[in-house]
Image (spheres, rainbow, N blue to C red):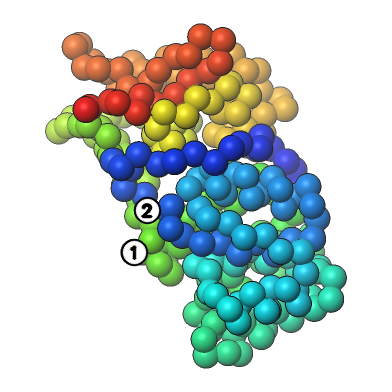
Amino acid sequence: MNQTAEVSSKSSNSARNKTSTATTRILLVEDEAALSTLLTYNLEAEGFEVESLECGDEAEARLDESLPDLVLLDWMLPGVSGLEICRRIRAREKTRALPIIMLTARGEESEKIRGLATGADDYIVKPFSVPELMARVRALLRRSRPDRITGLLTAGDLSLDRENWRVHRGERHVHLGPTEFRLLDHLMGRPGRVFSRAQLLDGVWGEAAEIDERTVDVHVGRLRKALSIGEEQDPIRTVRGAGYSFDEHFGK
């Protein structure tokens, strides 16, 4: 896997953050330990509750006990394959509507068709970037469980609409480029948490290896200029020697 997102610790969401992922449960079935750890930490950093398993037999038994809100399922697993688990999930009334994203190294069109025909809602080929996977998880949850994840973040007079890619400061529409929008989304979704430049590069750009860390400073500067005009309070906090964060007390 292209491990472009640095492992990050779990953080709590502000009460003002209306993206209700904190009670959203994801079952991750992946036998590659390093990848499982990477995805678990990044999903938890997004506010999801994650349970990780290594084989298909364990996943099937766990689904009999409790249903998650979404399953991330590797195709190649020891014991029962991910493809067979997907087929069994769709064959049972209790789990028929359970959202499934298949993770696989099989990139051929015929294999993608096979995975989707078996019942996967989405299909992502390794190697992939973690930001892309997170976007697919949020998109599938918005479609399948709109009560669990919405597209609106708010803090003070600032609002970010993920669905329509719009940001407002009170009645003022804030014009942001795609990178500045993703940067604000990343920071605003985890208020108070300090991100290093390397973490922001990994989480926002997804391909950090070929981008200089000072690029973050440039885009943070552009974001601040767009967000704060005149006497408006700057919601972005610089932590000397550490990085940047969204001020958890903004607007209070």
Using the rendered view, name the quadrant where residue 169 is placed: top left
Q: Residue at x 79, y 52 (%)?
A: 33
> Toward the viewer: 108 or 201?
201
> Label 1 belongs to which residue?
147
Residue 139, percent from left and from top:
47, 58
Residue 161, located in which quarter of the rendered image? Answer: top left
Mark 1: which secondary structure?
Answer: loop
What's the residue type where badge 2 is placed? Ser
The residue beneath circle 2 is 20
Q: Are there few (<14), some (14-19), or many (20+) residues within 10 Å of tag 1?
A: few
* Residue at 52%, 86% in the rendered image: 94
Residue situated furthest left in the rendering: 171
Task: Give how far apart the Cα atoms at labels 2 and 1 are.
Answer: 8 Å
10 Å crowding of disc 2: few (<14), some (14-19), many (20+): some
- Viewer can see residue 7: yes
| Vertical arrangement, residue 130 with respect to residue 181, above or below | below
Frontmost residue, 133 versus 199: 199
Using the image as rendered, state which of residue 171 and residue 175 is in the foreground: 171
Left or right side of 200 for 235: left
SS of the residue at dot 2? Answer: loop
For this orientation, the residue located farthest to the front is: 65
Tags 2 and 1 in contact by the CB under 8 Å rule?
yes
Which quarter of the image is occupied by the C terminus?
Answer: top left
Quadrant for residue 175, please give it.
top left
Up the image or down, 183 lies above or below 135; here it is above
Question: Where is residue 53 shown, x and y percent of the image?
Answer: 71, 64
Circle 1: residue type: Asp
Q: Is residue 220 left or right of residue 118?
A: left
Residue 158 location (% of width, % of height): 25, 32
Q: Earlier in the sequence, mark 2 or mark 1?
A: 2
> Vertical placement of 224 versus 202: above or below?
above
